[in-house]
Amino acid sequence: TVPDRIRNFCIIAHIDHGKSTLADRMLQLTEVVDARQMRAQYLDRMDIERERGITIKSQAVRMPWSVREGDLAGEQFVLNMIDTPGHVDFTYEVSRSLAACEGAVLLVDAAQGIEAQTLANLYLALENDMTIIPVLNKIDLPAAQPEKYAEELAHLIGCDPDDCLRVSGKTGVGVAHLLDEIVRQLPTPGAGSGDGTARAMIFDSVYDVYRGVVTYVRVVDGRLGARDRIRMMSTGAVHELLEIGVISPEPIKSDGLGAGEVGYLITGVKDVRQSRVGDTVTINAKPATEPLGGYKDPKPMVYSGLYPIDGSDYPLLRDALDKLKLNDAALVYEPETSAALGFGFRCGFLGLLHLEIIQERLEREFNLDLISTAPNVVYRVIMEDGKEHAVTNPSEFPDGKSSNIFEPTVRATVLTPNDFVGAVMELCQGRRGSLQGMDYLSADRVELRYTLPLGEIIYDFFDQLKSRTKGYASLDYEPSGEQQADLVKVDILLHGEPVDAFSSIVHKDKAYNYGVTIASKLQKLIPRQQFEVPIQAAIGSRIIARETIRAIRKDVLAKCYGGDISRKRKLLEKQKEGKKRMKMVGRVEVPQEAFIAALSTS
Ligand code: GDP
Ligand code: MG
């Protein structure tokens, strides 16, 4: 297809504003999927995505469209729709998907108005110089206020309220008109440089059990032919092309992809790390010299220890992580041992949702029962002797004098109704946030911009925000570097022995609170022993909080009054079994359940 017959677009929206439903209607209208094959959210392929109603991995679909109305009526075009992941953890992948398109449909729920992810995605689209088509969705809802939100949207992007299209992804109203407008308003992809070298950008890379890695690309210059050997520009690795084609909605082989086109390629590599999002593909025989811009290595932002509840599942957990890694270039892990939890892995994630997704897939697809330690961020610690450490596990925070500690920060955007501005500010300030700016989007809705430590928002920030605003506020954030902070490591000691799973790095003003909370929690959860057990919270050698588990004399045999031997034996066996799931911390026996309970509620 020649570039001026191609339109590449994506749909950007806040979660639940109806992106997947609208995409479904487009697939139907363009007859790429017929009504018989249609199932809701056709593009959300992973089970977990369907159940949670979120899109994790983007997909690209080619749709033929014959314009219905106006001057171009009857003319044939090819529309490539690229479905972007909608969540903050995947900002980089979103930005690559956007970079593969010339334009974006900015979809806003006509009963909700603009939300934080609407803004975050819009800003990303504007940074990529994309053409924006503003669209109000769900106009079939009785609660829809298209006039009001058209004003808001027009104000935001600087257009006329009448330029905002109105559709219903549910009933299909306005969707054909939207497809016509995509053809009319979006720029053509451009023919690329004419020097004969080829460049294509990878915007997604998915592991498939049968076919190996399927790589999604947007060709920017030249042409990738089915017989070419390709080269990945970030690594120089050369691969044979086994197959190249387009998705519509199933893969269709072709003899190549030209400038402006979007499609997939298969090389037989088995690991998405060899085919990375953001990388540039060129032809080995006649390589381009400069890669396309914007390549970044995925960088884990949040770490957590994952442990099998049943220690004998450890090899299963290792195999499961090895498998998931094939499909997830951002997942990192290494073995670690915890006195409290046994053998496990320290895993790095892009963010909290990423962590939850991996944990859920391990439990669901691999049948593992897991316990995870409280998530933490990565700290950069510079010691007085100038040595630098990147700390991904709080219990490994270096002893000795540090001169500087840096923590990662985020730029957060909160959208809230006017009434809750005070509550949101209080929350953000309590989390060491600093206000960067505040704007009224309309008379009753406010955008607040904060810089916050990432470590302060990965722990129940979103829940707090929702409960303080009766569910009305929305949040988006992106990494914004690091800042120096007064942080200390708080250790929790049981009978003088540190319990590694509870070590935490906290701001010095919050250390006391953390210590008291964990100590009193453990005091309630750990059964009495035959001797008195102190639980202490300490910063270095300084004790900041203390609780005590009083001693009992737990001699079960004493209850048997001599006589009954078989009953005695049964009791002994029972006691032995119970001990299996006990962990020894120094001299103290702790049921694993106590650790699990303390971690899950903390
Ligand atoms: P996404 O998170 O943006 O992909 O949103 P979905 O497409 O999954 O839709 C979220 C919810 O809104 C689902 O329950 C849909 O059935 C519903 N929905 C989507 N579009 C419409 C619409 O046009 N009208 C109505 N009434 N509901 C819609
Ligand atoms: Mg969706």
Image (tube, helix red, strand yellow):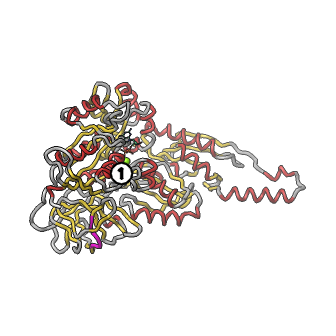
Q: Is residue 335 magenta?
A: no
Quarter of the figure with the N terminus: bottom left
To which quarter of the image does residue 413 belong?
top left
Q: Nearer the viewer, residue 590 or 265?
A: 265
Q: Is mark 1 within 8 Å of ligand 1?
A: no
Q: Provide the residue span drawn in magenta.
A: 241-245
Q: Position of residue 75 (x, y in %)?
A: 17, 53
Q: Amino acid at mark 1?
A: Arg
Q: Sort mark 1 into few (<14), some (14-19) or many (20+) by Cα contacts within 10 Å.
A: many
Q: Position of residue 142 (x, y in %)?
A: 38, 31
Q: Main secondary structure of the magenta part?
A: strand
Q: Is residue 39 visible?
A: yes
Q: Position of residue 364 (x, y in %)?
A: 51, 57
Q: How many marks?
A: 1
Left or right: where 556 falls relative to 542? right
Q: Residue at x 36, y 60 (%)?
A: 329
Rendered position, 321 above or below 28: below
Q: Is residue 87 visible?
A: no
Q: Position of residue 567 (x, y in %)?
A: 84, 56
Left or right: where 548 falls relative to 296? right
Left or right: where 308 falls relative to 405? right
Q: Nearer the viewer, residue 200 or 332?
A: 200
Q: Residue at x 63, y 41 (%)?
A: 524
Q: Residue furthest left?
A: 194
Tag 1 residue: 380
Q: Nearer the viewer, residue 558 or 356?
A: 356
Q: Residue at x 65, y 53 (%)?
A: 589
